[in-house]
Image (spheres, rainbow, N blue to C red):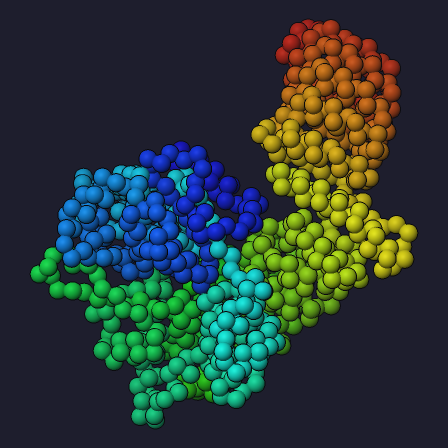
Amino acid sequence: KNSAKAMEKELVTCSPQEKEKTVINRNQIFEIPQRNDLETKVIVVLGKAGMGKSILVQKICQDWSNGEFSQFEFVFWFDCKQISLPEKQYSLKELLLEFFVKPQEGSKEIFEYILQNPAKVLLVFDGFKGLHDHENFPRCSASQPEKDLCRIKELISGLIQKKILNGCTLLFTARPKDKPYQHMSKVDKTLEIVGFSPQQRELYVTKYFEGLPYCDSALKLIKECEYLFSHCYSPVMCRFVCFLCETVLEMGEKTLPSTLTAVFLKFFQQKIMLMQTDVTTMQNQESLATLARIAWCLGEKHQSAMKSDLLPSKEVKEFALKYGFFLPFAFPKHSDSEEEEFGSTFSDFVIQNFLCALHLLLAEELKDKNLTKYLSFPSKKKKPYNWLDLMPRFLAGLMFLQDDPYFCSLSNEDAKQSTKKQKTLLKYIRRLQINNFCPERLLELLRCIYETQSNYLLQHVALRLKPDLSFLGIVLTPPDVHVLHSVLKRSKKEFSLDLRNSGIDMQGLKALVSLRNVTSFRASLSDTVRLWQSLEQTKDYELLKASTAKFVLDPFKAKTMKDISDLSDLVEMQEKMMNCVQEASGCTSYEIPAIRNLRKLEFALGPACGPQGLLKLAKILAAFPSLQHLDLDALSENGIGDEGAKSLSEVFPTLTSLETLNLSQNKITDLGAENLATALPSLSSLKTLSLYNNNICDFGAENLAKVLPAMTSLRVLDVQYNKITGVGAQQLTDSLRKCPHIKNLVMWNPTIPYGVLEHLQQLDSRISV
C-alpha cells in the first residue's frame, strides 16, 4: 500500500498539468537542492525515441572528460539495450570495470576506492526501455550485491534501493511511457527533452548543409514539405530527412517524398540498391526479409539487441553491418580464459520500426485480414505493440506504396497482392466507429491514414469526426498537429477543440485556431496569451480578433500559482488588446469574450499556496462581469483565512452576477466573518453562500444575522461545522424570521446542544440539522 501511495503521489507531481516549461543548462542537471549528499541521488531524463537522450549523456561524458562536473571522479555510461539481455548476469565490479572500461592494472584497488567513495561516482543507464517490465521489477536478493552475479534488473534495483553503492548518483534516460514507476517515489529529479523548436530545426538543417552549394535550396525544399519539416522536431528524424534531401539534390531531383513511409522506403533503396548488380539483388532482398523478421521477433519482446551468434547466417550479419542497420558490441568476460562474446543492436529505433512493418507485409504466414490487428487503434484494451510506436504508421503507408518502384526493388510482392491488402484496410476502416474513439486511438488512426495519402480514407475519417474533440492531457507533437490540421480542413463540420495540457507549440496552436471550421477552442492560458502576444507583435490583428472570439475559458479551475499568474496575464492582455483591435477595426471598446463569459471559477491551490494565491486572484476578479459561481473550496482546504476573506469582501461590489459563493474549509474566524458580513449585501444576485467547516463563533454568527434581511436574493446559507453555540444559533433563527426569501439554513454545529437545535428547527422548518 505504501509503495502504491508513493507512486500515485509521484505521478501527480509529474503530470502534464504540473509541468513547468523551463530551459535548463547541462550543468544544472545534477543540482538537487535540500538533498542529503550522503544518499543516492536518482535523476530521470525523459524523451521520446530519437529526441537526443543518448547524445545528451554522451555530451555529459565529454564535458566531464574536459573538467566539468568535477564532483565526480568516475563516470560510467551503459546502453541498456546491450546489458539487458535476459541470459546475462553481472556483478557490480564486472559491470563497471569489465563491461564499460577495463583498467590495465589495479582493478581491485580501483573498485575498493569506488566502494569507499560512492559520492564521487556517476552511473548513467541510457535507454531504460530495455528494462520495461516495471510491474515485476525484482528486488535485489544477493547476499553480497557488490560481488555476487545477478541480472541487470536486480543490480539496478539494488542501486535505486540504496543497497548497492549508497551515495552515488544515478542518471536514467527513458521514454515517457518507460518510467521506472515502481521506484518513482525514490526519484529526486525528472527532466524531459521536448525536441527542436522550428527555429532550431532550421538551424540544424543549415548546419548540416553548411559549406555545400545547395545549402539554401535544401532548407527551402525541406520547409516546403510541411509534414516532413514537422517531423524534424525530433533530432533523429531531422537527420534522416537531411540525408534524404542531400541525396535528392545530388541526383538533380526537386521534390521530397510526402510521407514518413516514403522517406524511409527511399532511404533503404538508396542504402542498399545504389551500387548493387542484378546478381546481388535477390540476395539483398532475402537478407532484408530475414533482417525484418529478426526486427519483429526482437520488437515483440521490447528488445533491439541480441547475441551475434544467434543471427541465422553470416550473410545476414555482414549485410546488416555493411549498410549500417546493425551496430556491434562486446560482452564482458567473467574470466580471462573465457572466450569473448559479441552482440548486435539495431542502429536506430526508426530502422527497427520500419523493418517490423516490412516483415508484417512480406511474411507469407500472415493473411491479409490479420494485418489490421497490428495497427494501434483497433483495440480498446492495452495496445500490444506501443513499444514499436512508428510501426503501425509504416505498415499502413507501405500498404499503399506496394506499387512504388522503390518498394518493388526491396521485395518480390506482386501488384495483385498489394491491391488486395489495400482493399482489406479500406474495408476495415469503413467498419470503425470513429466517433466513439478515445483521443489516443483517434490520433493513431489519423497518423496511419495520413501515411496512406489516400484521399478517400482521409475524407472518410474527416466526415466522421465528432464536433467536440478533446485532447486534454494528450501530448500533441508537431506532426500530430499537422495531421489533425490536414484532416479537419477537409471536413465541412464545425469543431470545438480542447488542447489544454497537450504540449502543443505556438505554431501548431496558430494553425488549428486559424481554421475557419474551428469555431471554439480551449488551450493552456500561457500558450494562448503567448500566441496573442505574437500576433500583436506581427500586427496580425484579424487573426488576433478571430482567435480571441473563439477562445473558451469557462469553467476555469486554478490548481497552481502559475494558473493564477496566467489568469492575471490574460486580464492584462485584454487591456493591451483593446488598443490593437480598436486600431484595426475602429471599435470603440473591446473585451475578450472568454473573460466576459467566465461563469464558474474554482480555486484549488491547497493550504500551502491558497492564502497567497487568493490575494492575487482578488485583484483581478472585477474583470469577470458574468461570474456566477466562485468556489474557493474545491475540496482543497485552501485556508485563505481572515486576510483572504477581507481581500475578497473588498471586490464584492463588482461581482454583481455572482449567484454561488463557496467559502468552505478556509479557516475563517469571527474577524473574517465580520468583514464578509459588511460587504455581502452588495452581492445583489447571490443565492447560495457556504461557510461550512470554518472557525466562526457566536460573534461572527451575530454579524451574519444582522445582514441576512438585506441579502434579498439569498436562498441557501450553510454554516455547518463551525464553533457557533446556542446563542449564535438563536440570533440566526431570529434573523431568519425577517427573511422570507431564504429557503434553507444549514446550521448543525457540534457546539450547539442537540435539544436547542431541535427546538429551533420546530420554530422554523427551513433550518436543517
Where, by quadrant of the figure, is residue 430 drawn?
A: bottom right
The extreme left residue here reads 337
Relative to 210, is 595 above or below? above
The image position of residue 696, as x and y in percent, is 69, 15
The extreme bottom residue here reads 278
Which of these two is toward me, 668 or 206? Answer: 206
The image position of residue 524, as x and y in percent, is 65, 50
Which of these two is toward me, 480 or 396? Answer: 480
Determine the residue positioned at 87% across, 20% down: 710
Determine the residue positioned at 79% across, 60% down: 541
Q: Is residue 89 visible?
A: no
Which of these two is toward me, 46 or 103? Answer: 103
The image position of residue 77, as x and y in percent, is 31, 55
Relative to 730, is 474 above or below? below
Where, by quadrant of the figure, is residue 352 drawn?
A: bottom left
The image position of residue 275, as x and y in percent, is 36, 89
Relative to 282, is 639 above or below? above
Determine the residue positioned at 71% across, 41% down: 568
